[in-house]
Amino acid sequence: MGMSSFGYGQRACLGQGVTRDETIVACGGLLWGFNLVHKMGKNGQPIMPSIDASNSLLIVKPDPYELAFEPRSDARRQEMRANWAQSDAQDKKERADFLAAARKAREPKVEVASEPLIDITTEAPSTMQSAPAVAPVELPPIVAVS
């Protein structure tokens, strides 16, 4: 089943299948942990969505309505909170490790030679020739243009 946001034919998004699969997993996770029930109005009666109301745009969809997500049981609530805490701790650790690695990668690499490359305390060997003298070059004066 194609969706216009993913395109069609040869130029269709390659991630469409992954997105569909991830949506199924996410919805399954929500249904595993929660009961979806109608919200209650101020009078204590459930707020029922209208089955006739919809927008009049090209892509017809129902008007927004509200649902309440209630944990299926206290055991599920505790399990979801424990999973959340574990996942949050792992995420914080991974972020800290990433930042530490990024900072280390940005540090300038300074290599110190154990021996000097040139011994400047002695004179150059006689086999080395000095560079030829270069005559100084005179530059034209700088003229301000206004």
Image (cartoon, rainbow, N blue to C red):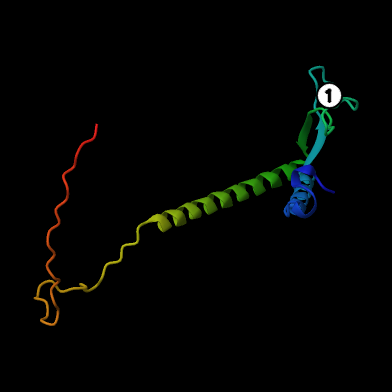
Q: Amino acid at mark 1?
A: Ile
Residue drawn at (47%, 52%) of the image: 99
In the shown orientation, is residue 26 left or right of residue 98?
A: right
In the shown orientation, is residue 29 left or right of residue 62?
A: left
Name the one closer to the observer, 112 or 24: 112
Residue drawn at (19%, 39%) of the image: 143
Q: Residue furthest bottom?
A: 127
Residue drawn at (9%, 75%) of the image: 122
In the shown orientation, is residue 144 left or right of residue 60?
A: left
Total tally of numbered discs in the picture: 1
Residue drawn at (11%, 77%) of the image: 124
Packing grade of label 1 (10 A; few <14, some 14-19, many >=20) is some
The image quarter containing residue 119 is bottom left
Expressed as whole percent of the image width and height from the top left, the position of residue 97 reads 49, 55
Name the one closer to the observer, 24 or 18: 18
The image quarter containing residue 71 is top right
Q: Quadrant of the C terminus?
A: top left
Expressed as whole percent of the image width and height from the top left, the position of residue 61 reads 83, 32
Name the one closer to the observer, 33 or 129: 129
* Residue for badge 1: 47
Q: Residue furthest top?
A: 43
In the shown orientation, is residue 73 left or right of residue 140?
A: right
SS for tag 1? loop
Relative to 1, residue 53 above or below? above
Expressed as whole percent of the image width and height from the top left, the position of residue 120 reads 13, 71
